[in-house]
Image (cartoon, rainbow, N blue to C red):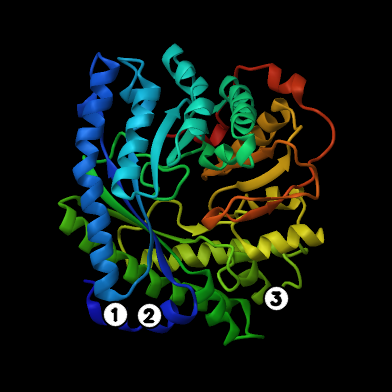
Amino acid sequence: MVNSREIIQTISMIKDQHLDIRTVTLHVSLFDCISESAERTADKVADKLMPLASSLVSTAEAIQAKYGIPIVNKRISVSPVSLIGAASGGYELIARALDRVAKECGIDFIGGYTALVQKAMTPCEREFILTIPEVLACTERVCASVNVGSTRAGINMDAVALMGEVIKRTAELTADRGSIGCAKLVVFANAVEDNPFMAGSFNGVSEGDAVVNVGISGPGVVKAALENIRGASCDILAETIKDTAFKITRMGELVGREAAAAIGAAFGIVDLSLAPTPVRGDSVGEVLREMGLSEVGAHGTTACLAMLNDAVKKGGTMASSHVGGLSGAFIPVSEDIGMIEAVRRGTLPIEKLEAMTSVCSVGLDMIAVPGDTDPATLSAMIADEAAIGVINGKTTAVRVIPVIGKSEGDEVEFGGLLGRAPVMRLSGGSAAAFVARGGRIPAPIHSYKN
């Protein structure tokens, strides 16, 4: 059992090493809000979420005051809106209701404007996906995601092609804000149902009515631990990361269980992820350099990241029987000062980032690319990442931002946790003819087991 005495051991981590609870996310089922009327569905969604959202914010603030643990974000995640609005077609109305609840209650982000189309799209789901650009342009806190592939289903190339168009349109509609709408949109393969991190969080169909999932982050803590064992073998390196992850996870479970009890929800999982911020000392890139790399992107980077990701997961699962989400290490370029600097220096090209996604927790995350990038190229990036996820049985994702009006070498400022990003060079050539084929890439042979 977790107790408050264990938190005392983490005080220096909180004060000096940027340890925080990145998010307490309340996942809520909206299936009981479905109605034949779009207006009625949206009203029922708001009525159900409003008291829960208010309770989440007050509970998080009370826990932060009680333990002195920073809780950076309070978030809500809901059932996939493509399913909730299918009977009424009122997708945009639901999105506006979600955004209104978030604003009024102080919720930082609200996820679940989601479609799960890894095998095929219904006409309703296609209609839903086409609403994403306008929804992300007219709301502030709504996040969207689309799952286009899975190891069991293969890759839905019709959805992949459509998402290239959707991303480009989203960038155009938010061009006056650095195309920031794309920062709230992620395309997945093997999406998980209990992920508390945005933009890809949604309440899966197998989840309960109200569940608290906690996302905890501590790259600064891991870096500080590694500074004390410079020159040690890889065995000791991995063990140190694992031990540090264990301590961090215990803190996350305490917060999650206490929040769930106060709200009257079930406790779900702790997502232990080394999720960076743009602040120096809170960077996965800096951890990789402490492991022995002169630069992020140097030969050996993928091996270091693989060891880091595996050790974090092992430490988390030792500490709690309820570890889930996307636990491991994230490598979002715009949100990590170490990654930003590596891209600026030219040591971390898009090709190396793609290789690293085969062993990290997500994929090509918060990547700014030239604004004139064509939709087929965006779709091809999604297809590549989906292939890595589907073949390897892991979650992969693309959150790419074609910044309208920007070219390679320029920078774009998003602000807050979203940070700033250098606009990266993309590989030459075109996959337009391949993307245009559509259809479905079949599931890999090793998926056929029951």
- The answer to whether residue 221 is above or below residue 140 is below
Question: Residue sitting at 53 percent across and 81 percent down?
Answer: 225
Residue 10: mark: 2
Amino acid type, residue under disc 2 in the picture? Thr
Q: Residues within 10 Å of mark 3 (few under 14, many from 20)?
A: some
Q: Position of residue 27 (x, y in %)?
A: 30, 44
Please give the name of the residue rendered at 30% of the width and 44% of the height, measured from the top-left corner: 104
Please tell me which of labels 3 and 1 falls first in the chain. Answer: 1
| Position of 91 relative to 235 (above/below) | above
Residue on which the image places disc 3: 292
Mark 1, secondary structure of its residue: helix
- Residue linked to disc 1: 6
Indicate the amino acid at tag 1: Glu
- Residue 254 in sight: no
Marker disc for residue 43: none
What's the CA distance linking mark 2 and mark 3? Answer: 26 Å
Amino acid found under the numbered disc labelled 3:
Gly
Do the CB atoms of the residues marked 1 and 2 lie less than 8 Å apart? yes
Secondary structure beneath dot 2 equals: loop
Q: Quadrant of the N terminus?
A: bottom left
Mark 3 → mark 1, Cα distance in angstroms: 31 Å
Q: Of residues 177 and 148, which is closer to you in this image?
A: 177
